[in-house]
Amino acid sequence: MIRLPALSAAARDTFWRSLQTLNGTRVVIALVLLVYLSFDSRGLRSTGDFLYAQTCASYLFLAVVFALTAAWWRHRFLLQLLSQVSCDLVVISLLYMAAGGVRSGLAILYLFPLAGCAILAPLVLALLFASLASLFMLGESLWRALGGEGDMAVLQAGLYGAAFFAAVLVVNRMAARLIGQEELAVQRGIEIGVQQAVNRLVMSQAGDGIVVVGPDGELLAGNPAARQMLGLSGALGLRLGAMPSLHPIAQAYEDWRAEPARHTAFVTIKPYTDPLLREMTAAWSARADLAAHLKVRFAAAETAEVGVERNVIFLQDVTAIENQAQQLKLASMGRLTASIAHEVRNPLSAIGHATSLLAEDLHGPVHVRLLKIVADNVARVNRMVEDILQLSRKAQGHAEPLALAHFAAELKAEFDETQRLDPRVLDIAKVADVTVHFDPVHLRAVLLNLLGNAIRYASRKGASIRLFVVQVEGRPPELHVQDDGPGITPEVRAHLFEPFYTTSSKGTGLGLYLARELCLNNDAMLDYEYRFDAGPVAGAESSGRFVITFARPYQ
């Protein structure tokens, strides 16, 4: 028993639609044959008018029945197809005989059912129907030749038969190839659909952020974690460089494109302070003061074959990891502070006292230089001990209303005097008259630390160090400390506020950590930000600044 090959649901649906198309064509052909009868006033009427009309009317009726059956009863496809093709051959053969055989030109109608069978049925069945049609035409031609109507009809019938076989073979092979391609496309579609479903599940459940960007930094797709980290809601389609809060990521992305080996960077962003995103997220008011410390990793998707560049940015919020690492360091340090206080500080005091006594008796240049070296190192070790002891004690803040303009003026006078600076180096002209809640002793310690770092790298030209206030409506004021020195590299920024991390041979690595702790004790936040907007003194590649975000405006 001949059966159709196993097909997918989509392919079976295509077969039924093709059968419906065949039925519609059959109705059209039946109507055309009836119209042809009304216009042919000679040959047909003289050779079988009644048979022709009755056959065409019956054919039209059967065509409508076949169409309705295929539309409402989608079962036994092959049985319906074979019955329809058999009916076509019988009707066309009757019309063929009534019209006068091969000379009538109706033999061309055989191509309609034979081509349909070649498309929708196995090749064996299509060849069977082609052979039946060819044998009928040859038999009818031989009968007419024996009746004395000439032998040219036999030759024409043979040519038609050969054409039928050739048409069936070509159409069947083409249809089989198209069916195979459709099956392959359906299978690939299923695989792609499954893969997309898995990708959506993985991206939606992943704790790390995943963002797909174009070569110009346009945000094309992102999972929920990335949208949360970046403060995005429906903002896809924007460019990274167009959003001020995402400038650090945009800069890191451009650096990676220029140098693919630098595929990892650490950035700090404040997405909820970006005016472009103000109306795009419901968490704006709740998270407007938060900064996100992110580890950013870049990877290029393999899309060169399709001529489209797509890159993926992986985002990991390392704030909790940094805090945990600091807690581990502090826990270890807490066990050392007691022994340091007793075992180091007391001998250090003795060495310092002995050095002072020796300085009273030794006045030679060599002795003075050696004693100065001892005294400097004693002071350095003592400062380190003090920092460690301060780190082990939780500094209690005594916040009070503090006018930043007056405070900055006093701090500038002190800093210029102690550093012996030209008064034009430190610029405080843009420190607005804003009142905040902060312990003045703590703020003085924080700013002296930041300014001390700035003077180490600044050019010491006019306004090479700037202290200024940034105010945005509805948000707490920010105090920025910026210099014209080289920006801090991404590798250093990743560990900037870790205790005991330093790039200076003379530093302890505790200054910035203690500064941030003092800010936290006063409900403020200290961060390092990297922006494209360079300002009046910083170059396009050195737009970093330390930012103190106060808790709230003083009421």
Image (spheres, rainbow, N blue to C red):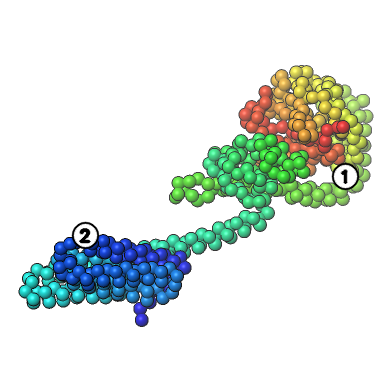
Q: Residue at x 64, y 32 (%)?
A: 532
Residue type indicated by callout 1: Ser
* In the displayed structure image, the side of residue 405 where residue 58 appears, left or right: left
Left or right of residue 374: residue 118: left
Q: Percent x, y for residue 297?
A: 62, 47
**Could you tell whether 165 is left or right of 440 in the image?**
left
Task: Tell me the quarter of the picture where residue 234 sits.
Answer: top right
- Rendered location of residue 379, percent (x, y): 86, 33
Q: Residue 201 location in percent, x, y?
A: 62, 58
Q: Which residue is mark 2?
A: 39
Total residue callouts: 2
User: Which element is circle 1 on?
Assistant: helix
Above or below 416: residue 553 = below
Which sits in the foreground, 15 or 238? 15
The residue drawn where x is 61% and y is 36% is 242
Q: Where on the picture, by quarter, is residue 487?
A: top right
Residue displayed at 87% across by 44% down: 392
Neighbourhood count class around disc 2 (C-alpha, 10 Å): few under 14, some 14–19, many 20 upward: few
- Residue drawn 65% across the image and 28% down it: 534
